[in-house]
Image: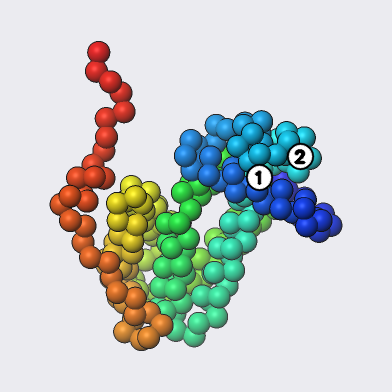
Amino acid sequence: MTPDTTQRPLRADAERNRRLIMETAERMFAERGAVATLNEIAHEAGVGVGTVYRRFPDLQTLVDALFTERFTTFLEVAAAAAEQPDPGRALRHYLLEAARRRAQDRALEVILAHADVAAEPIARMRDDLGRHVDGLAERAVAAGAVREDFASADVYAFLLMIGTVADRTEGVAPDAWRRYAELLLTGFGLAQDPGPKDSAPRPPVMTDAQALQIWPKRTTSES
């Protein structure tokens, strides 16, 4: 099932419960993956099971609602970037803002993996975002603002790499993703703009101690 976007606005208390359920699901997905049941989400959120089922009759509906919320935001970011007259700045703006949102959203990969992307309105939103990203990439290439072989697939690979860094370093160097985002953007030909709107300093390289902290940990005990 997909979220019903034609529903009337909820009462304030109903909307608070809906928001609480969604935020609880996000946290549980980030920690455990999409293995939580609606009953477990209700218990963790401190609301009745019936309250959850009234808003989300099954887990798929809840996942799809979270997907719709996120893609609405990414569409807004892409549309705002497209309004910038400079093609290079437009693409850079989208990449950095999308990376920031991915870095702060550990549940995103789980939601993308489990959403029903063949159903409406999700399929339409996915296609709309793809067209926006295609436009940003093609405009930047045509203007010579990015390396000539840059393509939309590089956007998704970029976000995958930054997401992996952000997830691994979250508790050790939470701003590290920005350093590596800048390095990748430089490789694309989108070096940091010296203007005041894009002058955030690049985070320093991690120390040896921090690098050791993010080293993969053994998850199974030896017999």
Q: Quadrant of the C terminus?
A: top left
Q: Which residue is mark 2?
A: 51
Query: Is disc 1 placed on a helix, strand or loop?
Result: helix
Which residue reaches farthest top? 223
Residue sitting at x 50%, y 82%: 84
Circle 1 crowding by C-alpha within 10 Å: few under 14, some 14–19, many from 20 = many
Q: Which residue is mark 1?
A: 21
Q: Quadrant of the N terminus?
A: top right
Residue sitting at x 60%, y 48%: 23
* In this picture, residue 179 sits left or right of residue 48: left
Residue 211 placement (x, y as % from top left) = 21, 49
Which residue reaches farthest front? 46
Residue 210 placement (x, y as % from top left) = 22, 51
Number of the label disc, if any, that sits on residue 177:
none
Residue 193 placement (x, y as % from top left) = 34, 81
Q: Report if residue 59 is visible in the image.
A: no
Which residue reaches farthest right? 8
Residue 83 placement (x, y as % from top left) = 55, 80
* In this picture, residue 71 sits left or right of residue 96: right
What type is the residue that disc 2 sits on? Thr
What type is the residue that disc 1 sits on? Ile
Instruction: Give the total number of marks visible in the rendering.
Output: 2
Q: Quadrant of residue 197?
A: bottom left
| 125 shown above or below 81 | above
Tell me the distance, in whole angstroms, between the alpha carbons under discs 2 and 1: 9 Å
Residue sitting at x 37%, y 86%: 196
